Image (spheres, helix red, strand yellow):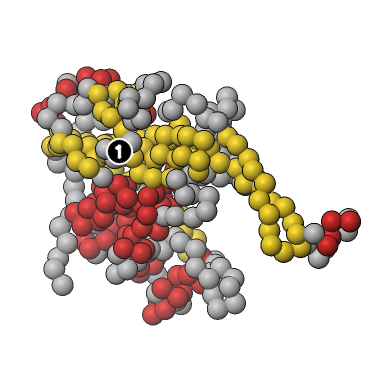
Amino acid sequence: MTEKKEFKKRVFGAVIIKAINSNYNADFSGQPRTLPDGKVYATDKALKYAIKNYIKDIYPNEKVFYFKRLKKDFIPFSLEEAYDTMFAEHKDTKNKMIMASDILSCIDIRLFGATFAKKGKNNVALSIHGPAQINHGINIWKEGNIFSEQIMSPFRNPDEKSAEKEATTLGRQSKLQEGHYLHHFSVNPKNLNDIVSLTENDTNNLSVEDINILKEALRKGATYYDSAAKAGTENELLIWVELKENSKLVLPNFSQLIKMKDDKENGLVVLDLSELKNILSKYNNEIEKIEIFRNKTSIKLENSPESCKIYSL
């Protein structure tokens, strides 16, 4: 087996997810999530789910731990059952070093970290600070129009006590007319250093291969995941700013530096990157590379940072 090269650089970036007549991230009532001021948003979990789902399907040799799985009776695994199934040879271990090494062999733990508590006879608790941190996504389009529509089921509800008990049931679904969710993210491989040193296993470090997979999933994961509610949800943009290995630079949240204009041009939304460009231009000697991946059919860029390379998603 080829030894994986450790990834040691820090990264700052942003992802934009487009939703057209879609529901990228619903609350428990089925509505697109909104802040108290009415602005539409999505949690970090929505993007992480899309990333993990993409990795699970496209890279089947990679272990993904925090993902819903069902037992033969269609009941979801508990945390302990998931561990005991994935790492059957260590199901009775009380050794924290072994358990930490086991779960760090899963790419989602190496990326996003975890709080892991195995109860019962072998009560063990671990907390792993993930290198990849993703912020909530805020809709930066000028509007956040949510609409609901009734849908009819082909079946009646036998428990209905009213006169409608012989009729098929009605449901309701809610969607966002148009939204462009902006997530800021960062990657700091040093977050794993302390716990990896305790496992005495360097293969648990974040690798260059891990980062390449993450980068691919950030570009494609939302588009890849498809469902009735999420049809119309697609990846639109990825900005990737990779610092030099020894840089101590801390960049501000990109969500405050990226603006979307109120008017479209030839059907494309227009993203103004002038504030981001001004910030990055001050630190050219600390930046290894700037890459932008965009959906050319939906977004236009203005004032892109100097020396950045622009690719299609």
Q: Is residue 165 visible?
A: yes
Farthest-out residue, front: 266
The residue to which callout 1 is attached is 297
The structure residue drawn at horizontal position 68% and vertical position 58%, both measured from the top left corner, is 153
Q: Quadrant of residue 282?
A: top left
Q: Quadrant of residue 209?
A: bottom left
- Given residues 6 and 289, the one toward you in this image is 289
- Given residues 32 and 61, the one toward you in this image is 32
Number of numbered discs on residues: 1
> For mark 1, does the 10 Å Cα neighbourhood hold few (<14), some (14 to 19), or many (20 or more) residues?
few
- Up/down of 103 relative to 147, above or below: below
- Given residues 254 and 154, the one toward you in this image is 154
The structure residue drawn at horizontal position 37% and vertical position 50%, both measured from the top left corner, is 223
Picture coordinates of residue 205 (x, y %)? 24, 57
Q: Is residue 140 left or right of residue 150?
A: left
Position of the C terminus by quadrant: top left
Picture coordinates of residue 273 (x, y %)? 27, 24
Q: Quadrant of residue 29?
A: top right
Give the SS element for disc 1: loop
Position of the N terminus by quadrant: bottom left
The structure residue drawn at horizontal position 20% and vertical position 33%, both measured from the top left corner, is 248
Type of the residue with mark 1: Thr
Q: Is residue 73 left or right of residue 161?
A: left
Picture coordinates of residue 192 (x, y %)? 30, 51
